[in-house]
Image: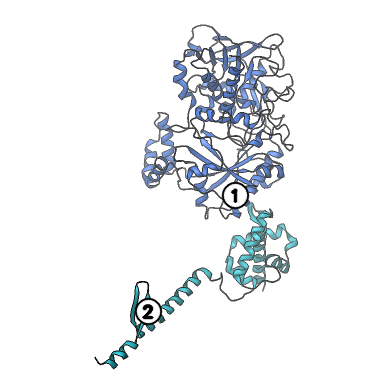
Amino acid sequence: MFIDLELAGGDVAIDADLCVIGAGAAGITIAREFAESSTKVCVLESGGSELELETQDLCAGRNIGHPYMDLDIARFRLFGGSTSFWGGACGWLSKIAFEERPWVPHSGWPISKEDLDQFQQRAARFLQLGAPLFDERVWGELGIEPLALDGTKLHDCFYQFSRDFWGPLYIGKRERDRFEKSANVQVVLHANVVNIQSSENAAVVERVDARTLRGIECTVKARVYVLACGGIDNARILLYSDNVEPHGLGNRYDLVGRFFMNHPNAHCATLARQGIGDFVGRYTKQGAADGTWYQGYLCLADGIQGRERVLNAAARMVYSTTPDSGMTAARRLWHKLRKGEVPDDLGTMLWRIARDIDEVAYNAYRQFVEKKAAVPSVGSVYLVSETEQAPNPNSRVVLSRQRDALGLPQADLDWQLTDLDKRTIVVLAKTVGSELARLNVARMQIDDWLLSDDGAWPPDAGRHHHHMGTTRMADDPKNGVVNRNCRVHGIDNLYVAGSSVFPTSGDTTPTLTIVALALRLADHFRNEHLL
Amino acid sequence: MSRAAGEEQNTSMISIRTSIGQRQVGRRQFLLSAFFSVVLACTWFRWRRAQVWTPVGGTQPCDLETGLGRLFGDHQALLALGGRYLESFPEEADYRRLSTALVGPSWTGQVEDLRCRLADARSQDFSHDDVLVLDGWVMARTEGRVGALMMMMSDRRHVH
């Protein structure tokens, strides 16, 4: 059931077995695992069912390091979290991402890839993906002969797309009904957590305090607490819950908020247009016969990562289209209709679609009948890097002196990138360019910023909403905030879910891994009889 | 018909064994058929040879400058990259050294041979990671050297 705290009429006290803070991908996954069970679950969500400006303002903060998007649009406070606005791309971490690599300081997970592979199929089902295929086997599903890549340098990897008929799957919308009808799961909306109260010795959490923007309070007492608010807010909440431990909860070794990682994706090369047709079609988004949508990209092989001492890296192909084309108008119209909105410039859109009806009709046939990606008139074709960021303790989330509308310290983001991050992209660009030239597939011109040694990055590098590492996982509390079961070191009943526990980021999107880790945590609660 | 005329008629026929038995054809008819078959076969053979086996740039031996010109034409982009190659590797700005590096000391003068040698060298470059980045363009060293040599040839033409 849903409770809107703003409409509660008075302060609320809730007793539960499990308290989940945050209703994004991780929080919803864990709560869903206990729906229709005897476990009493309380989910606290800062936002409502839709995006609200006033609540979004609680995400405000400053970027004090590498340029990044404004923090109040970097994550989303509503039931469903950032998966209410995502593109649906799901990848799976490679084996090397879990391993300790001598050339990558602070690398290595306390769990193995095999530990997480057990949850891959369940996570894929949750996200409505196809069979868990993310490697060269996908070419067989698509009926396409792969390029004869040198496997010691590059190999193919694939995203799958979590989607429904309209487009990317919005998890909150899908799960709303289930939680509405659930007898044992209470979702409390507009409940902003203002404090996690621990015992005097900070060994257990005793309660969680929440408050609405209008001042209505809610207290939750549970046996087990899970913090699932994303990479920035997980750290922020632990840091400002400081009335027992002055440096914040779980922060005895000054690790909370450190090792912030994003994927510093950047435009890295332009492809010569002549003779490129097959390459464009090969690596665009396309559907297989079973309805699964894939997009291929080129990944650095493990061997070359070791030889060149660089990170995981992948390159995907994007192309630009004319902004006033019929295809651009058709896409915009589709997205508006999906939200139930009528665009202001409907007439202009319809005219452009009519003017380019041949291209629009052909691509509609391709997309809905042949299950292939649209191929509109292409302007330029680019390579964009999707690379792992090196774990860096100086890249961090800190509490600001500025306060939000609840009187809580905002989060400032000091995102730091290193030479290793840039050098990885240089190696990626040269390797991809070399292979494409060797195979006579395409000619590539690397961007100027990669050819200079000044350490500069383009201002728009890193536009992803992938916030990782700020409560990283490690067996030793001196190296991590949570242990291998995502329990906060030193606190018996506080756990963290989401990408903030990632010790390394890999080169792929985090959502599938987030869901797999959440399922693993739910199983841990059951197996250890904690719930 | 008299027996002599009949015998004369019989000797002008040739018996040809076919898969369905024997067939009688006139000698003239046979010779004409055979002649035209040979002519057709030779014509087809020459046509096919022209399609598949004609060496790039003809069969007459030529000098290196002519050979590269026939392979790459007046390729402005290649000349520009060649200029950049010489700026980056000034120690290779020697005509004899560069041409030897590309085709070796015993080039036959055949353009097809040149094409094969360059293709092999290019392939070797990629295998050994001898890959350059010139003005951002990723290429094999051989490609850079070809551009450099053509650039030097172009300069010599303009000087002379």
Q: CA distance from mark 2 to mark 1?
A: 58 Å
Q: Quadrant of residue A191?
A: top right
Residue A198 vs residue A478: left or right? left
Q: Quadrant of residue B109?
A: bottom right
Residue A81 at what x, y percent from top left? Answer: 53, 24
Chain name for mark 2? B
Residue A71 at what x, y percent from top left? Answer: 59, 27
Task: Name the foreground residue: A229 vs A320.
Answer: A229
Instruction: Inspect this view and state whether residue A379 appears.
Output: no
Which chain has been coloured blue in this picture? A
Which residue appears at 36% of the width and 85% of the height? B27
| Residue that extends furthest to the left in the rendered view of this protein | B1
Which residue appears at 71% of the width and 65% of the height? B101
Against A411, residue A510 (above or below) is: below
Task: Name the foreground residue: B142 vs A240.
Answer: B142
Name the secondary structure under disc 1. loop
Q: Quadrant of residue B78?
A: bottom right
Q: Are marks 2 and 1 on the same chain?
A: no
Q: Which mark is residue A304?
A: none
Rendered-image quadrant of the C terminus of chain A: top right
Q: Which mark is residue B16?
A: 2
Which chain has been coloured cyan in this picture? B
Task: Name the foreground residue: B83 vs A437.
Answer: A437
Local packing at callout 1 (Cα closer than 10 Å; few below 14, some 14-19, many 20+) is some
Residue B54 vs residue B136: left or right? left
Q: Which residue is mark 1?
A: A149
Chain name for mark 1? A
Amino acid found under the numbered disc labelled 2 = Ile
